[in-house]
Amino acid sequence: MTNKGQKVKIFVLKDRCKGCGICVAVCQTEVLKLSDEKNKDGQRHPVVIDEEQCLNCGLCEMFCPDFAIWTTKEKEEVLG
Amino acid sequence: MVKRQKHPFDAFLKLKNIPTVWCPGCGIGIVVNTFIQTLKKMGLEANQITLISSGISCTGKISDHLNFKTVESENPFEEAAEFKQKNPQSRVVLFFNDNDLIVSGTKGLIQSCEAGLEILAVLINSFVCNVLFFHKKYQGISEKIFNLPRLMNHHGASYIARWTPLHCRRLSYSIKEALSKPGFSFIEVISPCLMYYASSGYEGKTIDRMGCYLENAKINNESPMKDLTVEDLDHIVIGKFLDRS
């Protein structure tokens, strides 16, 4: 599986994460892993190892119970 | 200037209450996420949906996290009927746990189902009322989970489905179909409480515990209603069982 050269950007809001590890388990191309450092609640949040492998399938965003991770196709940052 | 990153669903959330109150990896979070995804796919906005909850147990906290018009009431079905009379165009969604649906809310459920009230009732079945269910492994006692799809079929519901949190794409299609159809719609999500699950001898991380849904849940849309009782977590029948329209 390849991502055919498209630029995918993965965003993680680490202070919302509770460290359940669902995003790491559902990722088909092993883009994510749980970090060694802890966030402010003492949970290990996901970090991106290999962003180029990401297929933008959206499974991590779909399964995340805490609204902490999402992907976008281009390198456009959504501002708030 | 610090750029604040914004999740695509932030417009649907009450940001002061995020992170949510539920345990890490709880199925309620996944159901809420799926619900918001479905609304985005259907092109609905937050002010077109009304949530009515009883405020009891973990699912009662859903209305604290979502930016919808919310009503909290001790009799959610009566409240829904009144609200629906005043606003016939509104879409009303009710989230329940087995505490406030099976134990104390069965009367309202059956009455509104027989009246054909046009609402969507989502039951997130955590098995908390069936305390013996997880302990039979040790004590030789068996307790079956109440077969709500059969009850709803008997009383004339127009849409019945049952999924697990890990079948969230199918759950999303079900919510979409149920929201766009007239009549009483009932969706059951089997999502055993992770804390009870952990206390009865099952080991492993959240995702290992949730893996049993994918391995043991069998999709059978044609299954007869009387076979839908959950006797064991090894044999769960899921699917879209009824669609009268």
Image (cartoon, coloured by chain):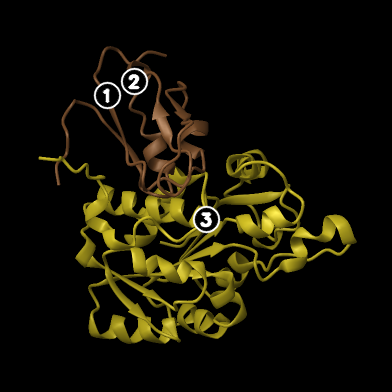
Q: Which residue is mark 1?
A: A8
Nearer to us in this view, A80 or B186: A80
Q: Locate residue B178, reporting x and y percent.
A: 39, 60
Q: Quadrant of residue A7?
A: top left
Element type at mark 3: loop
Which chain is tinted brown? Answer: A
Do the residues bearing badges 1 and 2 touch, measured as CB atoms within 8 Å? Answer: yes
Element type at mark 2: helix
Q: Earlier in the sequence, mark 1 or mark 2?
A: 1
**Crowding near the residue tagged with mark 3, few <14, some 14–19, many ≥20 C-alpha atoms within 10 Å:** some
Nearer to us in this view, B46 or A75: A75
Q: Amino acid at mark 3?
A: Cys
Position of B59 relative to B238 (above/below): below
**Crowding near the residue tagged with mark 1, few <14, some 14–19, many ≥20 C-alpha atoms within 10 Å:** some
Element type at mark 1: loop
Q: Amino acid at mark 1?
A: Val
Q: Where residue B23 is drawn, which disc sits there?
A: 3
Q: Locate residue B127, reporting x and y percent.
A: 65, 64
* Same chain letter for marks 1 and 3: no
Which chain is tinted yellow? Answer: B
Question: Image point 22% across, 45% down: which residue?
Answer: B6
Front label number (1 vs 2): 2
Per the model, the C-alpha gap separating discs 1 and 2 is 7 Å
Q: Is residue B222 visible?
A: no
Q: Where residue A51 is drawn, which disc sits there?
A: 2
